[in-house]
């Protein structure tokens, strides 16, 4: 999926690219959320349940995170890419505003999930 987003013109840095292959798999969500927000990066996530986890939600709030997540974690990478690309204009508009927030990326639209 990252290569598909790059092909669409986005600059993408995955957790594994940033932290390294082994370390990236071990980094806690709260830590990468804090790091990405401090870098002023827009975060793409594949699990909308992150909004229900108090620690991760608090990390988004504490650091002014701007997060967009797929609302159906059981779809393929190609389907995730399609959702992000379909909603890219709406994501860009939303991402131009300061956080904190989490948006869900559905098939054809984005919906604010938090706050």
Image (cartoon, rainbow, N blue to C red):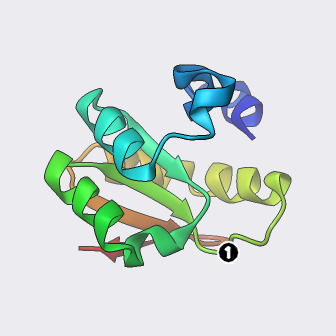
| Residue 71, x across and y down, in percent | 59, 73
Give the residue at x 21% y 52%.
99
Q: Quadrant of the N terminus?
A: top right
Residue 115, relative to residue 78: is it above or below?
Answer: below
* Left or right position of 60 against 98: right
Give residue 33's quadrant in the image: top left
| Residue 30, x across and y down, in percent | 35, 51
In front: 44, or 63?
63
Can residue 98 be seen here? The reply is: no
| Residue 107, x across and y down, in percent | 67, 71
Q: Quadrant of the C terminus?
A: bottom left
Residue 37, relative to residue 58: is it above or below?
Answer: above
Can residue 48 be seen here? The reply is: yes
| Residue 42, x across and y down, in percent | 40, 40
- Which residue is the site of mark 1? 72
* Left or right position of 42 against 80: left
Give the residue at x 55% y 26%.
13
* Left or right position of 38 against 88: left
Give the residue at x 29% y 26%.
39
Residue 8, relative to residue 47: is it above or below?
Answer: above
Give the residue at x 40% y 53%.
67
In front: 42, or 24?
24
């Amino acid at each position: 999926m990252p290569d598909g987003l790059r092909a669409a013109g986005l600059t993408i840095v995955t957790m594994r690219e940033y932290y390294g292959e082994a370390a990236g798999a071990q980094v806690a969500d709260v830590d990468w959320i804090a790091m990405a927000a401090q870098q002023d990066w827009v975060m793409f996530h594949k699990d909308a349940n992150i909004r229900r986890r108090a620690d991760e939600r608090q990390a988004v709030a504490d650091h002014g995170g701007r997060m967009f997540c797929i609302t159906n974690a059981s779809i393929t990478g190609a389907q995730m890419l399609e959702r992000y690309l379909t909603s890219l204009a709406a994501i860009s508009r939303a991402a131009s505003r300061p956080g904190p927030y989490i948006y869900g990326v559905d098939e054809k639209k984005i919906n604010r999930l938090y706050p």
